[in-house]
Amino acid sequence: MQKSEEVICKRRGDPENPQLSKNGDIILGGMFSFHSSWKDRKDNYMQKPLPLQCTSLNFREFQFAQAMRFAIEEINNSSDLLPGVSLGYKMYDTCGSIARGIKVALALVNGNEIVSAVSGAPCTRPASVQTILGETSSSPCMAISTIIGPFYIPMISHFATCACLSDKTKYPSFLRTIPSDYYQSRALAHLVKYFGWTWVGAIRTNDDYGNNGIATFTETAQQLGICLEYSVSFFRTDPYEKIQKIIEIIKASTSKVIIAFLSHMDMDVLINKLSIDGVTGYQWVGSESWISDSQIAAMDIHHILDGAIGLSIPKAHVTGLKEFILDVKSLNSSNNELFTEFWETLFSCKFKELNSTAENQRQCTGHEDMTGVQNSFTDMSLMSIFNNVYKGVYAVAHALHNILSCNETCNKNVQLDPFMILQHILKIYFKTKEGDEVYFDENGDPAAKYEIINWQPRKNSIVEFVTVGLYDASLSPDKQLTLQSNSLIWESNSKQVPVSVCSAKCPPGTRKVLQKGRPVCCYDCIRCADGEISNITDSVTCVRCLPEFWPNEKKDACIKKEAVFLSYEEIMGALLTAASLFGTCMTTGVALIFFKYRKTPIVRANNSELSFLLLFSLTLCFLCSLTFIGQPSEWSCMLRHTAFGITFVLCISCVLGKTMVVLVAFRATRPGSNVMKWFGPAQQRLCVTGFTLIQVFICVIWLTISPPFPFKNFKEFKDKITLECALGSVVGYWAVLGYIGLLSLLCFIFAFLARKLPDNFNEAKFITFSMLIFCAVWITFIPAYVSSPGKFSVAVEIFAILASSFGLLICIFFPKCYIILLKPERNTKKNIMGKGAP
């Protein structure tokens, strides 16, 4: 290089010229995809690649560019904002290409001008633009922000919603005037939950917008109990086979709700494929990128999306903007080639090379009348997005106004620095002329507010976007979502909310059991086990009732268990009571007979005093059975066992005494026997009293150490409470029974020994038979008592008491009553002594 005092600094590579531009004191950059695609090219790396050849003119991006121009023109004509300072712009076409987006971003930052620098000085200078507005999509914004972020050049997007762009460590200079998808994805999940859809499918654009949006949606959906049957992605440039495979997945699915997190360009492609395959009958839930797009609605000629619901940026109105957008003649002064293509496409006319006369050639001049033109450019349904562009320009203007200390005039000597502008943009707060608040949080995001849009078909195949609710993330969680559900129209023009669940809700009384290998939304409903209930729908577990309660028939509530005990009102209790009273009456009757004929030989024989005492004890035995009937109480539990034990010992003691009298009387008749003097009436009384006191002593010890007490038995029956008397000390209970058994055995032995006495001493035979019955009853009682449940064990015990009492009464006293009443001739001393006629 030749030495010179000046060094020429110029940008490497081919220069990039803006598609739209205007000079001004401060230049703002704009990046829009005036074309949405490009032609494929094959580079052989043997020569320099050709420039990207853009195709598919995108009218929406022209509308965004017009909104930016309108805001700049309005600011330049304002005397309140940036007085004396004019704003210019440079707008580039990125063609929807990330690589081209990075290239034009560098062109905006560096500029194409040749600059002279002093020898030895570096080729550095301030950025040619102070702020970049755009891009429309998230992925290009991520790539561009990564490049310009280290220089802190602000980039304000009007439509890039990926939540990832809120990360200030990666994208420190990125801001936006549209809410982050973090809020949109969560709002969509809450919207799905609101309608009870727990089994849904998801389709997303295979880029940062779609992938991050569905990732947040999935995370929130899982927290709300929503499952995704499938989650598939595609990009509009994917081969037909991949998109066809997605359609087959939709057809094979059981879910009826589809979450479509797609850009409008990808939705264009999908709706065409769905129309070809005739895929209908699904409820679509859309993201803001396409849900309010009238062009998508116009393409849906088969009404596949009728009833779709989703989130949209709140409607907006900017005075004068519509008229400015439609006034496109001013574009002709910026880039004649782009303007010509735009004008041709707008009016659907082409330049043609024809071998015909000039009169047959049709060309667009750029001065055609816009009246009557109906296409996506004249459609103003995206006014809310135009308003985002408008607010982005005004945010920069307000920041510059503060930096330049503008009042009546601005200080143009201030050296502008991108970092300074970024800091001031983050701090601005103002209201637009329409009253919209504009501010950014620490992540460069605006407040998250969405309208809930419903596609409602009208006559002539026109779809109306009806606002049916609002989602405001700034409110408390319970107030964020508001809906007018009665005004909604669903798929197939239905008024009924679609159902999309993997498994129907489990009603109260059942619990959910997950199906093996399937998502948590797929389950079976299992009836609650015995003793358990569930009182809510879709219960995961059943709750066990308290011990005193039991589930009702539906197993959705616990009801108090029925208390079961042997009562006087029931048939069994009434019969046992009657038997007890009948036995008491019979015993009383026998006692009256014996009392009336007390001086007769048959009554006086074998100690009449013991006979009356035996009859008294039998009466007590019959009556003590009544203490076992009725609801157990503390006193009845102690009384029933002790009364039974003592009265039966008294009864057996009397029988034992009578048996011994028979034996002694027989032996006293032998010559030289003086046995009778050792077993006179006094000794008999003492014997009975002694045997009885031993049982009283056993009962006193039992009641002192561990007496019987009322007890609620929950184990005997599942659905009932058995009220019974717990024994307290089991040893005490069996000691009482054992003592009765011991005396019964002795009595049986003595009676057995006296069985061969002369016939007239036949009382021993009757006592033997009565003791056989007594022992048989109580030996049978033990296993029957142990094996009988609840109140039946009480009934068994009462039956044993009554049976043994009737056995003693009938076997011992009925033969004597028979002689007294029916055979009085045999009731003589001679007959008793065996001296009478046979």
Image: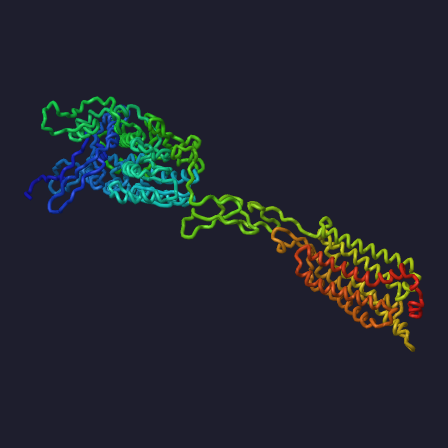
Task: Locate the C terminus and report the quarter of the image it occupies.
Answer: bottom right
Q: Residue furthest bottom?
A: 672
Count of numbered marks: 0
Tell me the quarter of the picture where residue 254 sits: top left
In the rendered image, the vertical position of residue 689 relative to residue 276, given as above or below:
below
Pick the front one: 456 or 688: 456
Q: Position of residue 819 (x, y in %)?
A: 89, 62
Pick the front one: 457 or 479: 457
- Tell me if 10 is positioned left or right of 686 in this view: left
In the rendered image, the vertical position of residue 550 relative to residue 347, given as above or below:
below
Q: Residue furthest left?
A: 2
Pick the front one: 559 or 98: 559
Pick the front one: 570 or 757: 757
Q: Residue at x 39, y 42 (%)?
A: 255
Q: Position of residue 62 (x, y in %)?
A: 23, 30
Tell me the quarter of the picture where residue 774 sits: bottom right
Q: Position of residue 326 (x, y in %)?
A: 25, 25
Say whether residue 67 is visible: no
Name the colouring of the figure. rainbow
- Tell me if 592 is positioned left or right of 639 in this view: right
Q: Residue at x 28, y 25 (%)?
A: 322
Q: Position of residue 400 (x, y in %)?
A: 26, 31
In the rendered image, the vertical position of residue 816 relative to residue 318, given as above or below:
below
Say whether residue 30 is visible: yes
Q: Residue at x 86, y 56 (%)?
A: 589
Task: Locate the N terminus and report the quarter of the image it occupies.
Answer: top left
Tell me the quarter of the picture where residue 111 sits: top left
